[in-house]
Amino acid sequence: MKSFYQKLFLLAFLPLYISIPVEAQENKKLRVVMIGAHPDDCDQDAGGTAILFAKMGYAVKFVSVTDGRAGHQTMKADDLKKRRFSEAQEAGKRFGVTYHVLNNHDGELLPTLEARLQVIKEIREWQADIVIAPRPNDYHPDHRYTGILVQDAAYMVAVPSVLPGTPALKNNPVFLYFQDFFQRPNPFRPDIAIDISTVFDQKIHAMDAHESQMYEWLPWIGHYAEQVPANKNDREKWLATTRAVPITNEVRASLTKYYGDSKAAQAKHAEAFEICEYGKQPKEEDIKRLFPMLGI
Ligand SMILES: [Zn+2]
């Protein structure tokens, strides 16, 4: 039983200890893990940011919590799973990131303890400073539960007695959410917006690696398969038009905060993130240190 003064000491100084950034202690390069439900989610939601991080020397990993076996109108699950793994590896090369695909069935993800431990392991092994995942409001149950799983991991990554075989993180990472357009129970809040205009073409080139999704499944399920160019050389140009995300007024305001009026007005493509309440809570100086591309 801790004395009153011991408790007071812990209450007063624990947050201070937790807030000391790892890289300040060890001078190591920053490490980012983005966690999506399917092998193409991180790519769409934050691929441009990943490229910018990778160009700065950050270690970036994409994790797909499911194996993608359900995302096709004709292919058998096992064949598709293999194909999507290869596509993800090729996309990873083009983005400049490591791509992990976990062995959970696409379309059947649940927020189980087993899946939570998988997510904790991925974050710990990467020694992540930044973790980005979907919000738990989404049309797709795999996306929703990926959001829940990452939220459930956001404290546990620092608890040594949970998954003791993989050392706990000494410092809780900053957790962020990818942008989405769902309004209930509350709309996405763009705390940080990154101008990705200079790397948008590279993002599209990397997404082009997901052939089974970009040119087959998504056009089929979205009823626009007839628009896919027959000539492969025309595909990336078409993909750029279909995968561009319009910059909302809120995201433009966030760009203005960090880049100033003129640069923000010129931005053609952006990716935005909301800070999750459950990990380390970054101050303004932490945000500028973790996202040095802001304002450049
Ligand atoms: Zn998805």
Image: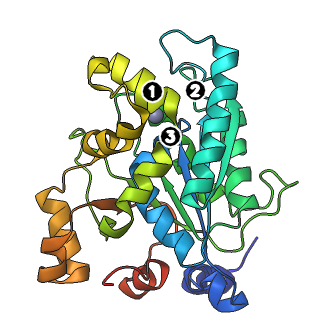
Q: Secondary structure at mark 2?
A: loop
**Which residue sits at x=61%, y=31%?**
84
Can residue 112 be seen here? The reply is no
The disc placed on residue 216 is: none
Could you give the CA–CA distance between mark 3 and mark 2, rounded to whole angstroms? 16 Å
Classify residue 8 by image quadrant. Answer: bottom right
Q: Which residue is mark 3?
A: 40
Amino acid, disc 2: Leu
Left or right: 241, with 164 as reference point: left
Left or right: 128, with 36 as reference point: right
Dividing the image into 4 quarters, which one contains the N terminus?
bottom right
Q: Nearer the viewer, residue 257 or 225?
A: 225
Could you give the CA–CA distance between mark 2 and mark 1, rounded to whole angstroms? 7 Å
Q: Tell me which numbered mark, 3 or 2, is placed earlier along the sequence.
A: 3
Q: Tell me which numbered mark, 3 or 1, is placed earlier along the sequence.
A: 3
Could you give the CA–CA distance between mark 3 and mark 1, rounded to whole angstroms? 16 Å
Q: Note whether ligand 1 is within 8 Å of mark 3.
A: yes
Amino acid, disc 1: Pro
Classify residue 229 by image quadrant. Answer: top left
Q: Nearer the viewer, residue 295 or 126?
A: 295
Amino acid, disc 3: Asp
Classify residue 5 by image quadrant. Answer: bottom right
The disc placed on residue 109 is: 2
**Which residue sits at x=43%, y=64%?**
49
- In the image, residue 265 sits, relative to residue 201, either above or below, namely below
Are the two marked residues, 2 and 1, in contact with CB atoms closer than 8 angstroms? yes
Q: Note whether ligand 1 is within 8 Å of mark 1.
A: no
